[in-house]
Image (cartoon, rainbow, N blue to C red):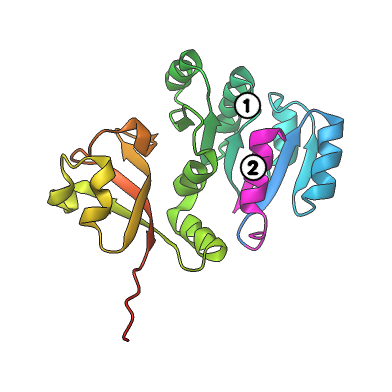
Amino acid sequence: MHIIILGGGRTGKKLLELFKGHSHQYKITVIEKDKKTCEYISEVYSYAEIVYGDATYPEVLEKARNKNTGALIAATGEDKTNLLAGKAAKKMGIPEIILIIRTYQYKELAKVMDLDNTIYPADSISAEIVTRLNGADFAELIHDLHLEIELKKIVVSQQPDLRGLPIARFEEKVAGNAYPILILRDNNYHLPSDIKEFNEGDEVIYWYKEIKTSIF
């Protein structure tokens, strides 16, 4: 999949680190309007292509896009820029558009503009983005980084004993060492610290490490 990342700032660099080493799966193009940042990205993240320019201009987006472009991640740090660029990308027909929005007003405006795939607030950005693109790929990435840790997902409606259970007691109901990292509720991702207990319909993404028992 070819992915366009808008912005080479702190969030953009986190994303580049996330996709680093997976160039066989993802081809990355970064759009950045600061020349020094472009030079830095070119040196440190040589696997990524760089397009210098303002992402709100359709001709810049067109230069970055190719026939295999499957997603655009707007992460410039400026909500207005992310929104305008996302709208332009949608008109171009890019299938998946993810906007990182930090203010409630722009989140509501994104809904009006039919740009519903927003991350707000921008917590666990890397985890959310890759999960939304392809959960299986995220699981593979975690496997590569932590060989004894798996990433799993469970749906509360399929495990009734989780309903109404406090978040802190999640491990009691799942065999092994299990720690929730994201909860999908009403099409929004939440950190465990934001949720008191599990509800019907919640989807829980969690770390899992099997408990090994000694035979001696």
Q: Answer left or right for 60 relative to 205.
A: right
Which quarter of the rendered picture does the N terminus lie within?
A: bottom right
Q: Which of the marked residues, 2 or 1, is nearer the chain's N terminus?
A: 2
Residue type (three-letter) at the residue carrying disc 2: Lys
Depth check: give the residue in front, 143 or 28.
143
Q: Disc count in the image?
A: 2
- Residue 150 visible in this rendered orientation of the protein: yes
Quarter of the image where the C terminus is located: bottom left
| Region in magenta | 1-24
* Up/down of 135 relative to 212, above or below: above
Give the camera-side residue of 148 and 42.
Answer: 148
Q: Is residue 101 left or right of residue 199?
A: right
Residue 42 on image: x %, y %: 83, 46
Q: Tell me if residue 1 comes above or below residue 78 in the rendering.
A: below
Vertical side of 78 occupied by 204: above or below: below
Give me the residue at 83% from left, 41% from top.
40
Q: Amino acid at mark 1?
A: Ala
Q: Secondary structure at mark 1?
A: helix
Q: Label 1 neighbourhood size at 10 Å, few (<14), some (14-19), many (20+)?
A: many
Q: Is residue 89 magenta?
A: no
2 or 1: mark nearer the eye: 2
Residue highlighted by disc 1? 85
Q: CA distance from mark 2 to mark 1?
A: 20 Å
Callouts 2 and 1 close, C-beta under 8 Å: no
Q: Which residue is mark 2?
A: 14
* Left or right of 40, for residue 8: left
